[in-house]
Image (tube, rainbow, N blue to C red):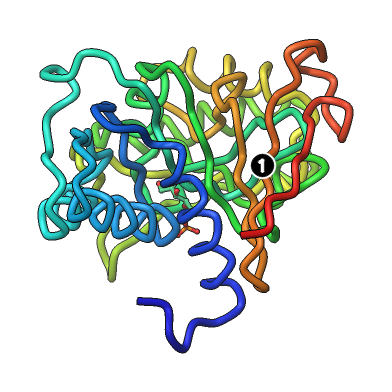
Amino acid sequence: MTDDLSPTDRAKFAAARRAADLVEDGMRVGLGTGSTAAWLVRCLGEAVAAGTRLTGVPTSRRTAELAREVGIEVVTLDEARWLDVTIDGADEFDGALNLIKGGGGALLHEKIVATASDRMVVIADAGKAVETLGAFPLPVEVIPFGWQTTRALIEEALAGLDVATREITIRTNGAAPFVTDEGNHILDLHLGRIGDPHRLSAALNALPGVVENGLFLDICDTVVVGHGDGRAELRDLDAAAPAQAGGAAGAVSRDLDD
Ligand SMILES: O=C(CO)[C@H](O)[C@H](O)COP(=O)(O)O
């Protein structure tokens, strides 16, 4: 399944394969969205074929389709109610394991599913590690009604916040605005650097018209970092370190050559 992969895809696969080993028989698993999460779903499909029993709650229609294709029993979040683990990709992660997500437009379901889980495990290639969040444009899901007014409100809110740049673009699909699984649009906030992610997240979610933003703060417990040579390294939040400590002090690493 992995012949002819680019180094980045090999890294994504390595992270997904290692994370699939964390799934135990009988678990209810939140299934993320994106190319790294797709590797995970394929790995879990192999585990199911080998006899592991699990139920999956997909975070998007795309993931639901792939999960069914590979033989995973798919249920809704309301049927599962609570999950043992959610495993998902990310666009950026920092030293405190805070994330930017939503590059694939599924951030709303992803945040709901991750929050309804005992543990959130992120799978990512090493290129997603950052010192400070914000180089990746921050996705914000907004309802279509009055989205241009919502964009203006976001611009006003950004004026008082610690960010490097303040450009906002509407995500498109061809000529039309991109539409999420919930029928909403995505505004991408090009901020360069986010000085205070908690303050920004609260300011965005306080605006009418904003449904959710792609900052996942204090949600992720573990990042499995994949490398192009096939290694995967686990970074766990150190319970002793304050979440806002950031940098290497906020997480502990274990090298797992497999
Ligand atoms: O948040 C997401 C989708 O909404 C993805 O997990 C994120 O964009 C990473 O994608 P990929 O694994 O393809 O790099």
| Viewer-proximal residue among 92 and 86 | 86
In the image, residue 203 lies at what x, y percent? 58, 17
Q: Is residue 142 among what the camera can see?
A: no
In the image, residue 208 lies at what x, y percent? 38, 17
Q: Is residue 148 left or right of residue 57?
A: right
The residue depicted at 80 percent of the width and 43 percent of the height is: 164
In the image, residue 220 lies at what x, y percent? 56, 27
The residue depicted at 48 percent of the width and 64 percent of the height is: 13
Give above or below for 218 relative to 13: above
The residue depicted at 54 percent of the width and 55 percent of the height is: 15
Element at badge 1? strand
Q: Residue 39, located in which quarter of the rendered image? A: bottom left
Q: Is residue 185 among what the camera can see?
A: yes
Respond yes or no on whether mark 1 lies under 8 Å from ligand 1.
no
Give above or below for 230 relative to 90: below
Q: Residue 73, located in which quarter of the rendered image? A: top left
The residue depicted at 39 percent of the width and 52 percent of the height is: 37
Quadrant location of the N terminus?
bottom left
Q: Is residue 3 left or right of residue 72?
A: right
Quadrant location of the C terminus?
bottom right
* Crowd band around label 1 with a 10 angstrom C-alpha radius: few (<14), some (14–19), many (20+): many
Residue annotated with mark 1: 234
Q: Is residue 233 left or right of residue 107?
A: right
In the image, residue 204 lies at what x, y percent? 53, 22
- Which amino acid is tagged 1? Leu
